[in-house]
Image (cartoon, coloured by chain):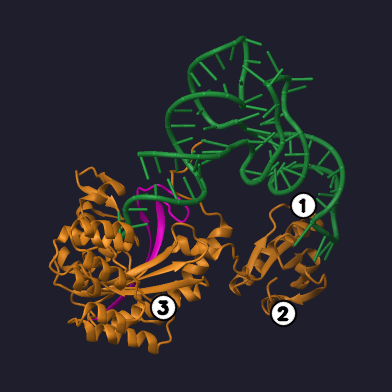
Chain colours: A orange, B green
RNA sequence: GCCAGGGUGGGGUAGUUGGUCAUCCUAGGGGACUGUGGAUCCCCCGACCCGGGUUCGAGUCUCGGCCCUGGCCCCA
């Protein structure tokens, strides 16, 4: 038997119902904040991703050559494609642009809990706004969306200027190594490395900074910064908004194009891969041939949100099943059509067996049985049987629809 | 790429000195039942992940691969 490719999944209707429900919540919240959905190609020029992230990521991507010899890659993320789209056809739109996306991405990695080779991301990009308020908006929207998705999470907010101020003047390679130690919270490794460089003093300050959870203390470690006002404004907005978060100057987000605020959100019940969201302020458009454009955004690991939620079936709508005799068939089709026009999920029995048999089958999943035979056909009526109470009524078609649509689903 | 534990009908399972026709539950399909409840009865479908090796004989032992689960690395 043929198997599906490694790291991919099939979704049966029960699971799709849940995914669509959460997807709908995320879309709805993004829209209420003024964000509009965009869509980019499933695959892009390979270069788009190597410009952003370096050649090293080629081995982590699905890369292929098309029949014209073009080097292409299945998208491993959506920020670069969305910013490419912005540069290609969004430059003249009035700013700021508020865009969101929900789409699948592909990475050639070892699957584990909450990590698949095909996975879905929900994300937003706020393009062309450069302010503490814009950064705060992105964080608050992230909070709203995840809260509405009904998972438990914690928000960590940092700012790259803080750490960079301490690393200023160091060799870029050194800076990168140090950021990696800090990102991994590997203080032992950090101490060893800085000691070998004769910078024990720096280690003390960096460790203190990464562990610092109070903004005033942060500035006593870093001293005054050009960005200080902006940073203080950001956090004062967050505080005024009643956001629950942890200040974390240790967030390094190993990428060079992040320029200021960075934040990460972690969920419970997730094992090793517990980050459900990452984002920050970045400059990327100029890499794709546009003008330098300050932007801010985040991406949610949708599949991880689903794992964190656990099994949670959305309430099904009311379901009606139609049982009918051969003489009632044509009237049954008319009735079913009218019910569907009224927005009621209506399933016609297809067995052609006895009424009893049809009702037995309908009763497995439906709330109402609509029974239609010769008598109903002749009087243009419908026998509506409530499968929970057992009661039944003979009604006109419009009354029958009213009876069923006015009810609560099971 | 690395480590650990796994892979028996669709789902869940039993199966050790290696030895009939591989167990049970459930789901699914068919039939009995043509105007009223998820029932009942009968029947059916359907599995040892794949490939090599050892053996008279492998679900069972062995090697390799694939896949799953968790972890490491990585995580744009």
Left or right of A116 in this view: B55: right
Identify which residue, B27 or A256, lies in the foreground: A256
Q: Does the image show residue A246?
A: yes
Identify which residue, A83 or A262, lies in the foreground: A262
Q: CA distance from mark 2 to mark 3?
A: 54 Å
Left or right of A106 in this view: A268: right
Above-or-below relation of B17 to A285 = above
Which of discs 1 and 3 lies nearer the camera? The answer is: 3
Q: CA distance from mark 1 to mark 3?
A: 61 Å
| Label 3: chain letter | A
Dividing the picture into quadrants, the one containing residue A329 is bottom right
Assess disc 1: are there few (<14), some (14-19) or many (≥20) residues with their C-alpha within 10 Å of its C-alpha: some
Above-or-below relation of A17 to A209 = above
Q: CA distance from mark 1 to mark 2?
A: 27 Å
Above-or-below relation of B35 to B10 = below
Above-or-below relation of B76 to A396 = above
Residue holding disc 3: A245
Residue holding disc 1: A353
Identify which residue, A347 or B35, lies in the foreground: A347
Going from N to C along the chain, the mark reached first, 1 or 2, is 1
Q: Quadrant of the C terminus of chain A?
A: bottom right
How far across and down, in percent of the image, does residue B44 sit? 73, 34
Dividing the picture into quadrants, the one containing residue A67 is top left
User: Which element carries disc 3, helix, strand or loop?
Assistant: loop
Residue holding disc 2: A399
Q: Which residues are magenta?
A: A95-122
Most distant residue in the bottom direction:
A240
């Amino acid at each position: 038997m043929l198997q599906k490719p490694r790291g991919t999944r099939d979704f049966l209707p029960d699971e799709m119902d849940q995914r669509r429900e959460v997807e709908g919540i995320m879309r709805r919240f993004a829209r209420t904040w003024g964000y509009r959905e965009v869509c980019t190609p499933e695959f892009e020029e390979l270069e788009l991703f190597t410009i952003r992230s370096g050649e090293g990521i080629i081995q982590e991507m699905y890369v292929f050559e098309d029949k014209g010899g073009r080097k292409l890659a299945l998208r491993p993320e959506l920020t670069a494609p969305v910013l490419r789209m912005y540069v290609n056809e969004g430059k003249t739109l009035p700013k700021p642009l508020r865009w969101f996306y929900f789409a699948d991405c592909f990475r050639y990695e070892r699957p584990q809990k909450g990590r698949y080779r095909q996975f879905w991301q929900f994300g937003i990009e706020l393009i062309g706004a450069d302010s503490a308020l814009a950064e705060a908006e992105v964080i608050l929207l992230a909070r709203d969306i995840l809260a509405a998705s009904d998972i438990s999470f914690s928000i960590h907010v940092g700012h790259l200027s803080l750490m960079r101020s301490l690393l200023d003047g160091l060799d870029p390679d050194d800076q990168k190594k140090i950021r990696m130690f800090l990102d991994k919270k590997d203080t032992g490794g950090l101490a060893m490395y800085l000691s070998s460089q004769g910078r024990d003093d720096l280690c003390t300050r960096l460790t203190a900074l990464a562990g610092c959870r109070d903004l005033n203390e942060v500035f006593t470690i870093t001293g005054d910064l050009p960005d200080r006002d902006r940073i203080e404004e950001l956090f004062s907005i967050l505080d005024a908004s009643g956001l629950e978060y942890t200040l974390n100057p240790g967030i390094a987000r190993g990428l060079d194009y992040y320029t200021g605020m960075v934040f990460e959100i972690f969920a419970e019940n997730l094992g090793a891969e517990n980050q459900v969201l990452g984002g920050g302020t970045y400059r990327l458009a100029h890499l794709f041939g546009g003008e330098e454009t300050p932007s801010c955004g985040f991406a949610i690991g949708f599949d991880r949100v689903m794992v964190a939620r656990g099994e949670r079936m959305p309430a099904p709508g009311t379901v009606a099943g139609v049982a009918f005799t051969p003489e009632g068939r044509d009237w049954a089709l008319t009735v079913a059509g009218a019910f569907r026009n009224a927005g009621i999920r209506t399933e016609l029995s297809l067995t052609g067996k006895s009424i009893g048999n049809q009702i037995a089958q309908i009763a497995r999943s439906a709330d109402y049985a609509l029974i239609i035979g010769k008598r109903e056909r002749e009087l243009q009526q419908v026998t509506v049987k409530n499968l929970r109470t057992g009661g039944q009524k003979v009604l006109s078609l419009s009354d029958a629809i009213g009876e069923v649509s006015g009810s609560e689903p099971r």
